[in-house]
Structure formats: C-alpha cells, structure tokens
C-alpha cells in the first residue's frame, strides 16, 4: 500500500518521541566513531585493575583500547591520539621508601609507584594533554595521582601530584593504611539526572586503601557521589602498617577504627575541568567486585565505568575552567 503524507508524518513524529524517550531514560546513542582509550600499565599499576578495566570497556563496544606503558609517557608521543587516558589502581607512591602504608618489601608489587615511574616528563605530558582536551579518568591510585596531594613521607617528601582536579586527600595515613572491603555510596542529586542514574547502578564499590577526597574549590569540582557509611563491617579487612624498619608502625587499635566515621559524606566520585580537558575520579573501584575483587562487578554495576566515561566524554560544558 502507498504511504500517505499523514502516515509519513506520524512515523516521523513517533521516531522523534522514541529518541526523546531514549535520552530521558539515559540510553546511550551510538557514537559516530569509537572513543580511543589508553589504559596505563606498568610500575605502580595493579594488573588486575588493568585487566578488569579492559574487559568492561571491551564489553561495551564503544571503545578502541590501547595499553600505554607508564614508562613511555613523556618519552614517546603515546598520548597524542587518545581521547581518554585511564590511570587505575595500584600505588601513586614508592612504598619501598615512602612508608605511608608500611608494606614489607615482599608485599610491594608496585615498585617505584606511579608518580616516580612517570617522572617529571611524564607528569608534565599528562597535565599538558589534559589541558589541551584529553579526558583523564583516575581510579583509586589514579585519583590520588590526579589530586593536589603533597607527599608527607619518605624520599619523595614535598613532591606534589598532578593537581588535575581541585581535590586533596583526607587522612591518607588512615584510609590508605591497610583498609579493604565493600563500601556504600550515596548518589548526589545532580542536574544531570542521566549521570546520576548511571552511577546509581553501583550501590557499593570495592574499597582498597582508596581515596577519601576533600574538595578544595567547590566552584571547579562537581561531587557525583559520597561515601554513605564506613566500609561494611562484614567485609572489612585491616592490616596494621609497618615502618621503614619493617616493625609495626604503631600499637593499639587500627587508626581506621578511630576515624572511620569521617568517611561519611566525603567525596567518593567527582568530575571537573582543566582547560579543554575533563577529569573523572573514582576513589573506590568501579571495575572490581565489592567483595571478591578477583571478579568483575555484579549485574548492572558492570556498566557503570564504561557508561560514566562515555557520558562525561560526550557532555557539552558551557564553561572552561582554569
């Protein structure tokens, strides 16, 4: 049967309604091209975090992944063709000498840590590219690295991290002092309801000496989620730190137990701008199962990392900051 103009108009209107509904429900429309993502590996980076991040992003299908050796950043043009750079879990510090967490030599699998592995050239290269338009995603140690943290201990005392985002770290010696388990998140009421819905899929995330952040400049940082409660008691695992001599750093109950309530309401997930670039930081791990970190997150929580990156990457901000 021939299609009349009225029928054609109704079909067109129906398509527009469906597209509008898709946007309201938070469905992602397909991109014209895949987003090129560099995932950093090497010294200071936990291989399980790298592995799980790759699996979650590949499952989404919107990404073209590249593994980026941390030692090549600043020495080769590895950042030039990337849309997004992900620096995941591990350690931003050198715990052979910077004994904030007091790991014994046998337990230190991260070598010099991310900051010293990058060196000044690597640090400058990341800052410059983000300012030019690269999106930076930091998870746990990667969030520490992107913060305004100044090292207080060890051979790197006085060194400053990237400061891609105007956040500092709250009592690192407490919350990064051997604290592991599942932690609940509270989603902030956002003008961007779609991003709120994405983050709401993960009621809990894995906490592993993770970043408890403090906002320095509220005008430049958007808090997306906060810590709802301390680490869930039934999942909590504590390890007492050791000093540079390998002895227990302090006696009595674990520092975390004295300060755990200070987590409540502090930023866990934030975003900001640096020049033309975007920054998305996760204090805990969206790529790990909250209780069994060797596994992927459960059910809908598996899409949180990929969809958060896609959403922030595509959003159009009105203003450039800094």
Image (cartoon, rainbow, N blue to C red):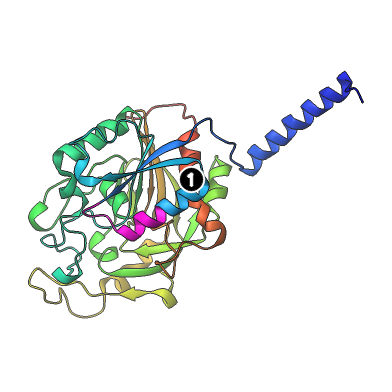
Residue visible at 12% across and 62% down?
96
The reply to whether residue 177 is visible in this rendering is yes
Q: Where is 289 relative to 192, above or below? A: below
Extreme residue toward the front, this view: 1
Q: Where is 246 relative to 277, above or below? A: below
Residue visible at 77% across and 26% down?
12
Extreme residue toward the right, this view: 1
Q: Quadrant of residue 280?
A: top left
Seen in the image, is 90 located left or right of residue 151? right
Seen in the image, is 141 located left or right of residue 221? left
Task: Magenta stretch: give its range.
Answer: 42-53
- Residue 58 shown in magenta: no
Q: How far across and down, in percent of the image, does residue 117 sit?
A: 17, 48
- Residue 45 shown in magenta: yes
Seen in the image, is 300 located left or right of residue 278? right
Residue visible at 74% across and 33% down?
17
Seen in the image, is 266 located left or right of residue 250? right
At mark 1, the secondary structure is helix
Q: Residues within 10 Å of mark 1 (few under 14, many from 20)?
A: some
Quadrant the C terminus occupies:
top left
Extreme residue toward the bottom, this view: 252
The reply to whether residue 147 is visible in this rendering is no
The foreground one among 59 and 270 is 59
Residue visible at 52% across and 52% down?
303
Residue tagged 1: 308
The foreground one among 106 and 146 is 106
Quadrant the N terminus occupies:
top right
Label tally: 1
The foreground one among 41 and 177 is 41
């Amino acid at each position: 049967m021939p299609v009349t103009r009225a029928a054609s108009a109704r079909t067109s209107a129906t398509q527009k309604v469906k597209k509008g509904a898709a946007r309201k429900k938070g469905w992602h429309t397909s991109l014209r091209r895949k987003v090129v993502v560099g995932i950093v590996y090497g010294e200071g980076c936990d291989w399980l975090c790298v592995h799980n991040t790759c699996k979650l992003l590949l499952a989404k299908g919107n990404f073209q992944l590249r593994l980026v050796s941390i030692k090549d950043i600043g020495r080769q043009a590895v950042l030039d063709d990337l849309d997004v750079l992900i620096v995941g879990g591990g350690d931003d510090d050198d715990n052979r000498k910077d004994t904030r967490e007091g790991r014994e030599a046998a337990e230190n699998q991260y070598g010099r840590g991310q900051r010293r592995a990058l060196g000044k050239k690597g640090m400058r290269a990341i800052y410059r590219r983000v300012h030019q338009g690269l999106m930076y995603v930091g998870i746990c140690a990667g969030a520490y690295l992107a913060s305004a943290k100044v090292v207080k201990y060890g051979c790197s005392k006085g060194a400053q991290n990237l400061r891609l985002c105007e956040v500092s770290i709250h009592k690192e010696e407490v919350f990064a002092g051997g604290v592991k388990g599942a932690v609940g998140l509270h989603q902030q009421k956002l003008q961007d309801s779609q991003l709120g819905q994405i983050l709401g899929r993960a009621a809990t995330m894995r906490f592993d000496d993770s970043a408890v952040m403090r906002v320095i400049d509220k005008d430049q940082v958007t808090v997306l989620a906060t810590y709802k409660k301390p680490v869930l008691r039934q999942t909590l695992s504590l390890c007492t730190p050791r000093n540079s001599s390998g002895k227990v750093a302090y006696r009595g109950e674990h520092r975390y137990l004295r300060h755990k309530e200070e987590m409540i309401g502090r930023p866990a997930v934030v975003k900001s701008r640096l020049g033309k670039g975007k920054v998305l930081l996760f204090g805990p791990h969206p790529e790990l199962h909250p209780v069994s970190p060797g596994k992927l997150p459960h059910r809908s929580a598996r899409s949180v990392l990929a969809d958060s990156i896609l959403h922030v990457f595509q959003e159009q901000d009105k203003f450039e900051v800094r």
